[in-house]
Image: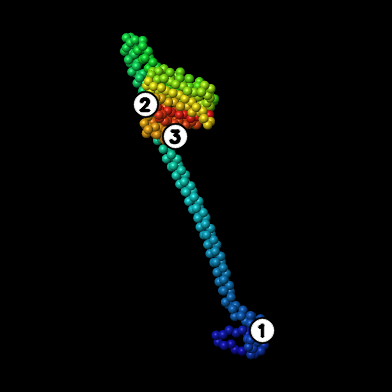
């Protein structure tokens, strides 16, 4: 057989397959293995490039996949680092805000401390001014007239001088005691005392001062009545109440009573003096029942001592105006 021009011959392959006939049989009569062999021989020039292309494509796909995976991991790492930085910045911002709030609180406390210090100094000066004025006037008069005054006049002057110096002494003692109670480590020393003995100590202390104002002191206390308290704190409170009653009363009566009821001891200090207005009465009771500073009451350090010491004793203070006039202050203590 002569091959046509431009066609390829399959004679060697046909001879290899054992075909000896000069005329080929139809393809449908050829065995399957001969058809496969014919396909492979036809594609023996196309298969290698195809396989090479597939191999290159697989390598490119694998390279791109690895590159994508590396970039994805890099993005994840960057995202994780970004989240960490964001969290650190948020934590830093929170700490800065906390420090800023603490600075604001410290600033407010500093202003409050300065304000309290100024108020304390103003109260101290106010309370010292009165006894110092009397002391100055009396000593100046005594310096000029002690040679020509009678003994009675000298006795009155010396009594006033003694009262003035006593007030200064008590005030300084109370200030020191009050300062010590501002310390959180201060411990209230509760003991059992006979109330009449405690009141008699105050009576002896204030007897001359009360007589100097022309007042009389009346006591109505059960003879064996006991109270569980800190003696120093209670005496300081009662001393201030008696002193206030005596200063606001002339030629009158100061009365101290005590009653026990419902596991409470109520000590009442009343006077027949000038009393106070309903508005001031309302304000002063609010002052003793809250921690608010009251503008008309801050001029007396004694009010602050009474309030602070009463709270240390778990006691309450209540002011009222009796029908007979004057003023009554009730101090209620736990029994």
Mark nearer the viewer, 1 or 2 = 2
Within-10-Å neighbours for mark 1: few <14, some 14–19, many 20+: few
- Rendered view: 276 above or below 197: below
Q: Looking at this rendering, what residue extends furthest in the right direction? A: 18
Tell me: 251 left or right of 16: left
Inter-mark Cα distance, 2 to 3: 24 Å
* Element marked by disc 1: loop
Q: How is the image coloured?
A: rainbow
303 lies left or right of 185: left
The x and y percentages for residue 74 are 52, 57
Dot 2: element: loop
Marks 3 and 1: which is nearer the front? 3
Rendered position, 332 above or below 27:
above
> Can residue 163 be seen from the camera position used here?
no
Judged left or right of residue 22, residue 104 is: left
The residue carrying mark 2 is: 274
- Which residue corresponds to mark 1? 31
Q: Which residue is at the front of the view, 45 or 208?
A: 208
Which quadrant would residue 97 be assigned to in this image? top left
Q: Residue at x 53, y 64 (%)?
A: 64
Q: Residue 297's x, y, as percent? A: 38, 31
Compute the Cα span from label 1 to label 2. Answer: 140 Å
Residue in the picture at 45% in, 20% down: 203
Which residue is at a point 42% across and 28% down the rendered structure image? 328
Q: Residue at x 64, y 84 (%)?
A: 14
Q: Are marks 2 and 3 in contact (CB under 8 Å)?
A: no
- Between 242 and 136, the one lying in front of the other is 242
| Marking on residue 44 | none
Point out the residue furthest to the bottom here.
23
Reading the image, the residue beneath label 3 is 289
SS of the residue under disc 3:
helix
């Amino acid at each position: 057989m002569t091959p046509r021009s431009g066609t390829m011959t399959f004679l060697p392959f046909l001879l290899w397959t054992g075909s000896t006939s000069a005329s080929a049989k139809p393809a449908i009569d050829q065995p399957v293995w001969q058809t496969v062999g014919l396909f492979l021989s036809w594609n023996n020039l196309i298969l290698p490039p195809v396989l090479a292309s597939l191999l290159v494509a697989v390598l490119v796909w694998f390279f791109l996949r690895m590159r994508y995976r590396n970039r994805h991991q890099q993005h994840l790492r960057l995202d994780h680092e970004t989240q960490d930085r964001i969290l650190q910045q948020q934590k830093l911002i929170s700490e800065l805000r906390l420090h800023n709030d603490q600075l604001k609180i410290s600033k407010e406390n500093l202003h409050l401390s300065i304000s309290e210090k100024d108020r304390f100094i103003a109260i101290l000066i106010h309370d010292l001014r009165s006894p110092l004025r009397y002391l100055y006037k009396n000593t100046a008069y005594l310096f000029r007239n002690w040679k020509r005054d009678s003994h009675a006049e000298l006795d009155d002057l010396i009594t006033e001088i003694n009262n003035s110096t006593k007030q200064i002494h008590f005030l300084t003692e109370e200030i020191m005691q009050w300062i010590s109670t501002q310390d959180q480590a201060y411990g209230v020393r509760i003991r059992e005392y006979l109330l009449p003995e405690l009141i008699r100590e105050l009576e002896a202390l204030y007897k001359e001062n009360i007589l100097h104002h022309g007042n009389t002191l009346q006591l109505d206390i059960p003879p064996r009545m006991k109270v569980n308290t800190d003696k120093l704190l209670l005496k300081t409170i009662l001393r201030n109440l008696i002193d206030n009653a005596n200063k606001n009363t002339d030629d009158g009566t100061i009365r101290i009573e005590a009653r026990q009821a419902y596991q409470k001891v109520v000590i009442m200090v009343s006077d027949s003096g000038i009393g106070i207005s309903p508005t001031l009465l309302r304000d002063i009771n609010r002052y003793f029942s809250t921690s608010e500073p009251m503008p008309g009451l801050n001029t007396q350090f004694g009010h602050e001592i009474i309030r602070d010491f009463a709270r240390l004793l778990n006691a309450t203070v209540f002011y009222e105006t009796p029908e007979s006039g004057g003023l009554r202050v009730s101090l209620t203590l736990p029994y």
